[in-house]
Each structure stands twice: as C-alpha cells, then as structure tokens.
Image (tube, rainbow, N blue to C red):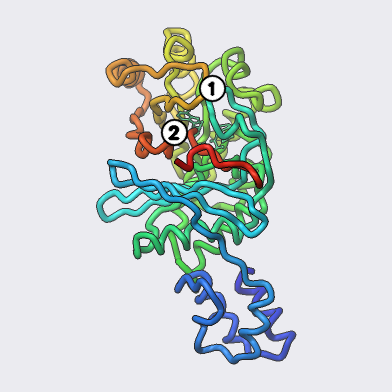
C-alpha cells in the first residue's frame, strides 16, 4: 500500500495517522521480514497486519566471479523469479523482474522463450529489493527494471512499485536512479512521459529497420519504428532526460552496414544514446555473439557518424544472470538454472 492508502485504512479502523508512517517504514525502509519485528506497534495492529503479511523466500543463490549474485525468489503461490545484485564500488544496483516470464517473445531472449506466467504485484516487485538488500546488508543505490518481464506490460504495478521505492518514508531512492527498460510499448511510454518523472527510459531497439526488427521482436508489428521513435523523442523533450537505446550485438544479423546507416539516421541529432550489449547465449537461442573487437569497431563507426555510444559490460554471465538469461521456472517445475 502507498502511504496515503495506509493512512486511510488505518484511520478508518480507529488508529492514529502516524501509525501509517511506522508501518510503511517497517516494510519499505527497515525491511522487516515479519510483523514480530514491528515492536513499536500495538499488538492488535500487529495481529491485523499478520493476516495479510507475505514475504518472498530466497530458494537459491548463485555468486558470479565478478561479484554479482543471482537470487531465485519464490512467492507464496510457488511462482519463482530471478533478481540480480550488482555491487559496483559504492553503487549497489538491483536488477528486478517485473513479471514472471514474458509474453513478448523476442527471438534472442531466454525469458521470452518461457512465455508469461503471471504479473507481479507491486509488493512482489519491491520484495526483491528487500531480499537483495538483506544479502549485502546494504541499501540499493540504483534499481533497474531489466530482469524478467516487460515492465510496461505490467504498467500499474510498475508505477506503484516505483512510488514505493521512491517515497521519503521508505527507501527514498531518487527517481533519477531508477531505469525502466522496455521493448517499446508506445502508449505506455507516452503515459510515462506524462508523469514528468525523469526516470531513465531504456528502449530495446536491436535493429534500425522494421524489416529486421520485426523478425527479432514481434512487438514491432504493433509499434513499428515510425511510432516508437517519435514517442521516445517526445519523452526526451518532455523530461529533459536522455533516452538510452539498447542494441544486442548479433553476429551477422544486426552488425552490418545497412543497420549502421539506418541507426545513425534514427539517432543522430537528439537527446539519446546507444548502448551496445554483448549477446549472452542461452540454451536454444539461435544466435552468435560478436567479439569484443567487433563491437568496438561498430561503436567507433557509429561515433564517427555523431552518435553517442557506450558498450555495456555484462556481469554475471557465468551464472546465467546476464541480460536475457533469466528464467523463472513455473510452479511444480524444476528450475533450470538452479544447479
Ligand atoms: N523487457 C524489457 C526489459 C528486460 S530485458 C526489455 O526488453 O527491454 C533487459 C535487456 O536485455 C533488454 O534490452 C533485452 O533486449 C536484453 N536482452 C534480452 N536477451 C538478451 C541476450 N540473450 N543477450 C543480451 N541481451 C539480451
Ligand atoms: Fe520480454 Fe524483454 Fe526478453 Fe523481449 S527482451 S522477451 S520484452 S524480457
């Protein structure tokens, strides 16, 4: 619940207003894992909260050589998702799942292969942050919606989770430290820009012509580049924030001259930049990664065309925690990445 909802609920039951702030803080700041920890609340209120108090459970954990970790989290109906923890110096970034599975079916993504199991509630989204923070005994500095699922296909819960993470009574994570990555749902991008939030918008582009993008990402037939790009430009103009385009480098597929030319046409001259992502292989994905050298060459050629380019340093690939490798496993199924 958001603070104002808690206030309304608790005052309707005869509790003073300040109890809302205490309850919100226990859940969203102190990271309480049980109502027993909420020692400054009266016993009657704790009993009431107990009725609806649910937490996730960390079922498995894998540590990468590079310091990142992946948690397999199970919710109370047995649904599982993966969450990735990325400590980088003073920064601690948590990569969240917004859905269990994903229904978007991108050809290069292991999560997409599973299909969508179900939406996650806002509480299940923020619960991943609580469990991750407990692991490192450190508060999150950044949160990216780049785990399993398409956050804008779970729009209401994603927006609610952001309000919970950002609220000063709770974790108070600055809106500029939050990133939403989307495959390009145009109406939701428009809705997001109307919030005037300055959240970082990352858009999975992966190809610069409709012909190729349509092959890689089924969503392109609904929202082709001629609709997607204006929505992104509008987002940048309205929020003053640079839009990030993600581009997974698939050898012999999207790394050629035609795409290069089309990319510079789409991205030159406005507030955006391109983030090249090394392809992370996963079982059953029919693509090959470009070498680091090939990616650098591609980046240099784009730079020469006046495009701002960065190359993502992928973490966690050795424990299948890198972009596009996450899988949840459905109720009653063995989790594929567990061992
Ligand atoms: N559904 C959202 C966010 C989750 S995926 C989206 O698609 O944007 C996070 C990023 O990883 C996206 O840019 C996605 O395209 C990319 N990705 C998916 N599969 C990948 C793979 N096998 N290797 C590298 N990146 C991948
Ligand atoms: Fe879903 Fe994103 Fe994977 Fe596409 S890349 S299938 S939208 S998680």
- Identify residue for label 2: 272
Secondary element type, mark 1: loop
Q: Is residue 143 left or right of residue 300?
A: right
State the image coordinates of residue 100 (x, y, percent, origin top left): 62, 45
The foreground one among 40 and 255 is 40
State the image coordinates of residue 2 (x, y, percent, origin top left): 62, 69
Q: Residue at x 58, y 22 (%)?
A: 107
Q: Is residue 185 left or right of residue 252?
A: right
Local crowd size for mark 2, using a 10 Å CA cut-off: few (<14), some (14–19), many (≥20)? many
Q: Which mark is residue 46?
A: none
Q: Nearer the viewer, mark 1 or mark 2?
A: 1
The foreground one among 50 and 251 is 50
Q: Residue at x 38, y 63 (%)?
A: 139
| Residue 98 to residue 282: above or below | below
State the image coordinates of residue 323 (x, y, percent, origin top left): 45, 35
Q: Residue at x 55, y 64 (%)?
A: 164
Specify the quadrant that holds the N terminus.
Answer: bottom right
State the image coordinates of residue 74 (x, y, percent, origin top left): 57, 54
Q: Is residue 320 left or right of residue 292?
A: right
């Amino acid at each position: 619940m958001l603070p104002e909802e808690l206030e309304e609920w608790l005052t309707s039951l005869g509790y003073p207003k300040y109890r809302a702030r205490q309850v919100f803080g226990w859940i969203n700041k102190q990271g309480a894992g049980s109502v027993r920890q909420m020692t400054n609340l009266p016993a009657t209120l704790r009993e009431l909260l107990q009725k609806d108090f649910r937490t996730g459970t960390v079922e498995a954990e894998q540590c990468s050589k590079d310091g990142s970790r992946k948690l397999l989290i199970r919710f109370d109906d047995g649904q599982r998702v993966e969450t990735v923890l990325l400590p980088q110096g003073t920064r601690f970034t948590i990569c969240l799942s917004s859905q269990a599975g994903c229904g978007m079916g991108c050809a290069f993504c292991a999560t997409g292969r599973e299909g969508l199991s179900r939406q996650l509630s806002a509480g299940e989204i923020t619960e991943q942050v609580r469990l991750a923070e407990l692991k490192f005994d450190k508060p999150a500095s950044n949160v990216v919606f780049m785990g399993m699922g398409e956050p804008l296909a779970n729009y209401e819960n994603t927006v609610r989770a952001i309000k919970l993470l950002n609220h000063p009574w709770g974790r108070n994570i600055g809106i500029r430290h939050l990133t939403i990555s989307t495959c390009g749902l145009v109406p939701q991008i428009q809705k997001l820009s109307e919030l005037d939030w300055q959240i970082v918008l990352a858009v999975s582009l992966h190809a610069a012509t409709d012909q190729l993008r349509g092959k890689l990402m089924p969503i392109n037939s609904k929202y082709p580049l001629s609709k997607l790009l204006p929505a992104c430009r509008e987002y940048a103009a309205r929020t003053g924030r640079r839009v990030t385009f993600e581009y997974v480098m698939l050898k012999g597929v999207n790394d050629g001259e035609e795409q290069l030319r089309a990319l510079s046409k789409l991205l030159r001259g406005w507030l955006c930049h391109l983030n090249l992502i090394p392809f992370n292989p996963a079982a059953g994905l029919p693509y090959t990664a470009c070498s680091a050298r090939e990616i650098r060459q591609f980046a240099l050629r784009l730079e020469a065309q006046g495009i701002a380019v960065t190359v993502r340093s992928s973490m966690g690939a050795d424990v299948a925690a890198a972009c596009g490798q996450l899988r949840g496993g459905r109720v009653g199924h063995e989790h594929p990445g567990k061992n």
